[in-house]
């Protein structure tokens, strides 16, 4: 069959129809002097004709062999690209480093306008002394005058904004770095890699490939062994909900979890919409999606009775609230309102009075501010069961933030 395969032809045609750019690296196994091969064969001629007719450019530079073993050296690995992005490919070349394969590694840069760096705030690097000073200036001695649901909404929004503003002012944005270290790599593998590299360089100079093959086989065997051991150790160490949730995210990296049928009341649901509603009605009866139109009834005034005040005073004491705040892990991820426990724990002596006042007002009025009502959960199914009660609601913010 003449190259390229039908799948590649469909890919190139789709990119052309949708006006998308494409960079394609391939082991063409085709020879032509246009891309540096020592000779020309039928596959090379057919591939070159297709590339010309499809307006696909060959990015290869020079004639350094991309395939090398004890028998032959040849250029059979191609880098292909659509014309627009082909002009952005710079510094194309065949790496001198051993790739642990018969095919050499190919390196190049794509010089394009880079997207903005991803930035985030790292809570553990907050200047907590300045944060406390900021909070004390804004909230120390503050008393909220709450006589309506609208007042309660405004007071809770003010309290939240003060904490967020203090945090953002004293925890600057930092560039997010991604560690490329792998847990299974070790010094033994590093030494085997160096041995393979030396054997490869010696084979190129002297033409003796047996030692390189043995070194490469041993290296690949130890890499596979280290990966298996690391994965087994990782799985055996999972004994809590948060690590299990992270594992579930890793195993579903495509971020596509199809919504299946569930059986809430003896019958299976008919469509995805019903499948979404059933677990909400089971675990959170009476809940509904919050919209931008939701808010507090404006102008409503409530006459607080002595009984209401006494009961709220018994339930919401500063000691109880302080104990509850300190019971959380400090750097548990922020919820929908952007607050995480450390923001309350670092200056709890100043914050305890306004928090107590907000809780008492919410209880006595029988009204919960909108920001307190927002929640997001992920339902994890139990294996082999379809009922809506078999879905466990898990807080997706249970894992710690950037540490």
Image: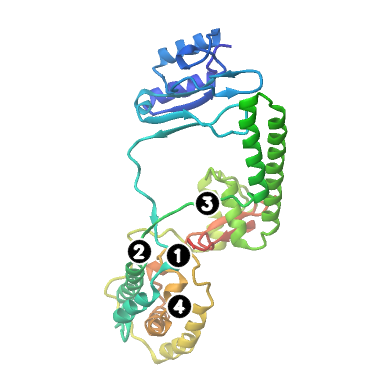
Q: Residue furthest left?
A: 299
The image position of residue 29, as x and y in percent, is 57, 17
Give the CA separation, mark 3 to mark 1: 22 Å
Q: Nearer the viewer, mark 3 or mark 2?
A: 2
Q: Which residue is mark 4?
A: 345
Mark earlier in primary sequence (2, 1): 2
Q: Which residue is mark 1?
A: 335
Mark 4 nearby-residue class (10 Å; few <14, some 14–19, many ≥20): some
Drawn side of residue 308 relative to residue 283, left or right: left
Mark earlier in primary sequence (4, 1): 1
Q: Badges 4 and 3: C-beta atoms under 8 Å apart?
A: no
Q: Badges 2 and 1: C-beta atoms under 8 Å apart?
A: no
Q: Nearer the viewer, mark 4 or mark 3?
A: 4
4 vs 91, nearest the viewer: 91
Give the CA separation, mark 2 to mark 1: 20 Å
325 vs 96, nearest the viewer: 96
Q: Is residue 318 visible?
A: yes
Q: Is residue 147 visible?
A: no
In the structure shown, which secondary structural element does the residue marked by tag 2 occupy? loop
Mark 1 nearby-residue class (10 Å; few <14, some 14–19, many ≥20): some
256 vs 71, nearest the viewer: 71
Q: Is residue 236 above or below residue 22?
A: below
Give the CA separation, mark 4 to mark 3: 36 Å
Q: Is residue 58 above or below residue 152?
A: above
Q: Which mark is residue 172?
A: 2
Q: Which residue is mark 3?
A: 276
Quadrant of the image occupied by residue 81? top left
The image position of residue 328, as x and y in percent, is 52, 74
Mark 3 nearby-residue class (10 Å; few <14, some 14–19, many ≥20): some
Mark earlier in primary sequence (3, 1): 3
């Amino acid at each position: 069959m003449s190259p390229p395969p039908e799948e590649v032809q469909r890919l190139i045609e789709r990119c052309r129809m949708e006006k998308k750019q494409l960079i394609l690296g391939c082991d063409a196994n085709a020879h032509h002097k246009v891309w540096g091969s020592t000779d020309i064969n039928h596959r090379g001629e057919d591939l070159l004709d297709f590339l010309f007719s499809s307006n696909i450019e060959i990015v290869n530079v020079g004639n350094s062999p991309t395939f090398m073993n004890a028998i032959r050296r040849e250029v059979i690995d191609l880098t292909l690209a659509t014309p627009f992005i082909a002009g952005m490919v710079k510094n194309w070349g065949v790496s001198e480093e051993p790739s642990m394969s018969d095919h050499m590694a190919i390196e190049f840069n794509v010089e394009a306008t880079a997207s903005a760096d991803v930035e985030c705030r790292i809570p553990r690097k907050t200047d907590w002394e300045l944060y406390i000073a900021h909070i004390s200036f804004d909230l120390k001695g503050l008393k909220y005058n709450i006589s309506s649901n609208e007042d309660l909404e405004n007071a809770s929004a003010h309290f939240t904004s003060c904490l967020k503003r203090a945090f953002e002012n004293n925890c600057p944005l930092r560039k997010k770095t991604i560690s490329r270290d792998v847990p299974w790599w070790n010094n033994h593998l590093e030494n085997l890699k160096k041995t393979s590299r030396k054997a490869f360089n010696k084979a190129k100079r002297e033409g003796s490939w047996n030692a390189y093959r043995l070194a490469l086989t041993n290296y690949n065997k130890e890499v596979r062994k280290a990966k298996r051991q690391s994965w087994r150790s990782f799985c055996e160490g999972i004994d809590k909900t948060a690590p299990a949730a992270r594992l579930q995210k890793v195993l579903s990296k495509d971020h596509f979890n199809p919504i299946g049928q569930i059986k809430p009341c003896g019958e299976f649901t008919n469509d995805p919409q019903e499948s979404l509603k059933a677990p909400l009605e089971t675990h959170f009866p009476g809940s509904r999606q919050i919209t931008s139109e939701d808010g507090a009834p404006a102008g409503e005034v409530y006459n607080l009775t002595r009984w209401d005040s006494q009961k709220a005073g018994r339930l919401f004491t500063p000691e109880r609230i302080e104990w509850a705040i300190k019971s959380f892990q400090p750097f548990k991820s922020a919820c929908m309102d952007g607050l995480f426990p450390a923001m309350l724990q670092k200056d709890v002596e100043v914050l305890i009075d306004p928090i107590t006042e907000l809780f008492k007002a919410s209880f006595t009025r029988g009204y919960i501010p909108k920001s307190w009502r927002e929640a997001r959960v992920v339902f994890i199914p139990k294996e082999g069961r379809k009922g809506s009660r078999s879905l466990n609601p898990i807080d997706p913010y249970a894992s710690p933030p950037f540490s």
